[in-house]
Amino acid sequence: MTPPNEETAVTPPVEEPSESLPPEETSPTAAGTGTNAIQLKRLLRRNRPVLYAYGLLVTLALVGEIITGGFLAPSHIDEMIITGAFIAFVALGQTFAILSGGIDLSIPWVLNSASVLLTLWAHDSSLRMIWLVPVLLVGGALIGLVNGVGVAFLRIPPIIMTLGMSSVVEGGLLLYTNGGSGGVAPSADVYLATHRWGSFPVVALLWIVVLVGATVVLSKTPFGRRLYAVGLNSRVAFFAGVNVKMVTVSVYVLSGVAGVIAGVALAGYVGESYLGMGDPYLFASVAAVAIGGASILGGTGNYVGTTAGALALAVLAALLPILGFPQAALEIVYGCVILGAIAVSSAKVGSRRRVE
């Protein structure tokens, strides 16, 4: 019995410390894998049209091999690569022009002028190419400068400005040559366009250099970002601080230079020059850009896709005779591709405006 003067000691309940579970730790490897997967998914989604273009290329090549054995023989692949390289050289400037929301229809006659003037002025001397090629590049840049000034400062629609300049260059060349053909390509030019370094055609290696350079410019430089901004919406780009006029002028200068490079290379491959040798590349350059997934109205696309488009057209050009179609059928393909690309781009722009 407890005495009354002593308080009963009450022992408070002892609370056991709650065991808080530590947050689940994600290993750095798992986090990195998840981030890489998300980035890869975004990359694939953004470049889906380019993947379609390469899928078309592979499909056409397999169809050719199924129809006729030897279509994918190494020698025939070389021919298609070289054909695709020349389309891609011409389409380099066209890619930049279309990305800006314009188009350059003067490219064929810039190409033709470079070929004819090189063969006429070189007199079959490779040494003269040392000064001839820079002069021709400057000439192509000046033609592009006139195009760019007309489009950017005089507000002439690109299709009208470049078509008019094409006519001017054509007329000037006809006057200079009196309607005659050019001469024989210098041996150094022939070497660059037809010979090999190891097992690779020289022209294909030059194409790879151009591909890497164009991709770096478009994806890794401020100029590339400004170009896409101008193509998407020039007014918004202007208010964002982009010098829209200078970007536009630069694009057409680059297109003129690319036309000269294509002309010099084509003269070496053919071994001579003649009037009209650039005509087949007008719609081919636009079609290559369109097949490569670029919006024909500007703002989206890249030269990697244009490369796929150029190769697809080269394979198609080799496949049509096997299927019994004349080479003229390729012009129908060009037209259908361009019209389809314009229709798709216009539909996208219309839906975007309705959402806004």
Image (cartoon, rainbow, N blue to C red):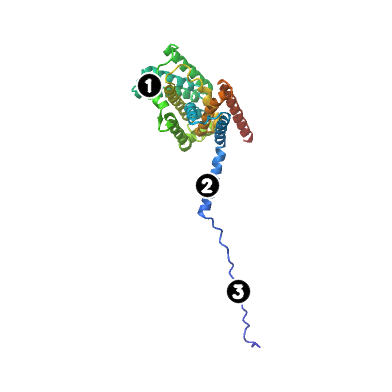
Residue at the right extreme of this rendering? 1
Give the mark nearer the N terminus: 1 vs 3. 3
Disc 3, SS: loop
Q: In this rendering, is residue 163 above or below 95?
A: above
The kind of residue on which mark 2 rests is Asn
Residue contact between numbered discs 3 and 2, judged by CB atoms under 8 Å: no
Disc 2, SS: helix
The residue where tag 3 is placed is 14
Q: Residue at x 61, y 34 (%)?
A: 352
Q: In this rendering, is residue 304 above or below 284?
A: below
Residue 130 seen from this side: yes
Give the image quarter of residue 130: top left
Say which mark, if any, is on residue 36.
2
Residue at the front extreme of this rendering? 69
Which mark is in front, 3 or 2? 2
Picture coordinates of residue 112, whole percent (x, y): 45, 19
Q: Is residue 121 left or right of residue 86?
A: left
Mark 2 nearby-residue class (10 Å; few <14, some 14–19, many ≥20): few
Closer to the camera, 172 or 82?
82
The residue where tag 1 is placed is 186
Give the mark nearer the N terminus: 3 vs 2. 3
Q: Is residue 340 left or right of residue 75?
A: right
Picture coordinates of residue 105, whole percent (x, y): 51, 22
Q: CA distance from mark 1 to mark 3?
A: 100 Å
Mark 3 nearby-residue class (10 Å; few <14, some 14–19, many ≥20): few
The kind of residue on which mark 1 rests is Pro
Q: Quadrant of the C terminus?
A: top right
Give the mark nearer the N terminus: 1 vs 2. 2
Which mark is in front, 1 or 3? 1
Q: In this rendering, is residue 235 above or below 335?
A: below
